[in-house]
Image (cartoon, rainbow, N blue to C red):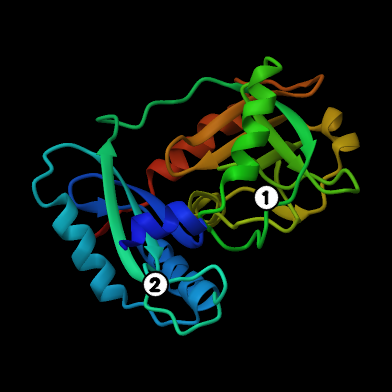
Amino acid sequence: MTAVDNLALTNYGHFTTMRVQDGAVRGLGLHLDRLVTDCATVFGAELSRGYVRERIRAAIAEADAPLTVRVTVADPGLRLDRPAAPADPHVLVTTRAATPQPQPQPPIRVRSTTYVRDVPTVKHTGLFGPLFERRRAQLDGYDDALFTDGGGRVGEGPTWNVGFVDGDTVVWPLADVLAGVTMRLLAAAHDGPQRTEPVELSRLSGMATAFATNAAGAIRPIAAVDGVTFATDHPIIGLLRRRYAEVAPEAV
């Protein structure tokens, strides 16, 4: 049985996704750190950064255009009845075409829903819950879902982090979420005021704007959460995009 076969049966593994252009990735070190840390958490095993880089290099060797690269770690020998058995995780690298240049994504309208991902600090392959909530939101006419906990505090989207702007300050929700690479790069690059604190749904009407971040869309404006609308042309959106574009990619 291959690791892919076993993933189909168990859905037990972890991954990271990155955009590769000219053999380089923004935040490559953070992606590798994530894979190493998550492998220790999910499998209790050590993962070689050097080996992962070799596998990525091999996957992109013939590429003459930007690619979206996903690195998945799974164990082909994992059994449903003995997930605690010694693991032998394998590295799977898959690619798909990416846009020649990252294009600003159109604003999205999202619906809040009470949902917290399993083991939220790990980027694991258990995507059924998040995608089910995304599907439900889209069937109701929204573009995506925004997760909140049982107390109405904002967390994250199915595959993205969320940020808000209070006055001139970027606010990152304090919650049990996956700290995305794009969010971390943006927080480090932004030279304006920012803070991390709990953000309740009841506070959103006082925010100037909101945005989503991930490797695929970089910074994407949020037009509305439920019935609360935001200015999608707020100057800070353009500023954040410029700061992110200034982050130097790292060679694979």
- Depth check, front residue: 77 or 131: 77
Q: Where is mark 2, residue-wise?
A: 77
Q: Is 102 placed left or right of 86 in the picture?
A: left
Q: Provide residue 161's location: percent of width, then percent of height.
A: 61, 45
Q: Residues within 10 Å of mark 2 (few under 14, many from 20)?
A: some
Which of the 4 image quadrants contains residue 88?
bottom left
Look at label 1 and name its amino acid: Pro
Q: Provide residue 252's location: percent of width, then percent of height.
A: 23, 61
- Depth check, front residue: 126 or 40: 126
Lower position in the chain sequence, tag 1 or tag 2: 2
**CA gap, disc 1 to disc 2?**
48 Å
Q: Is 236 placed left or right of 210 in the picture?
A: left
- Quarter of the image with the N terminus is bottom left
Q: Where is mark 1, residue-wise?
A: 193
Residue at 77% x, 33% y is 112
Q: Is residue 67 above or below residue 30?
A: above
Residue 252 shows up from this direction: no
Residue 60 shows up from this direction: yes
Q: Provide residue 123's location: percent of width, then percent of height.
A: 53, 58
Q: Is residue 65 above or below residue 246?
A: above
Residue at 59% x, 57% y is 179
Look at label 2 and name its amino acid: Gly
Q: Nearer the viewer, mark 1 or mark 2?
A: 2
**Element marked by disc 1:** loop
Residue at 23% x, 44% y is 21
**Element marked by disc 2:** loop
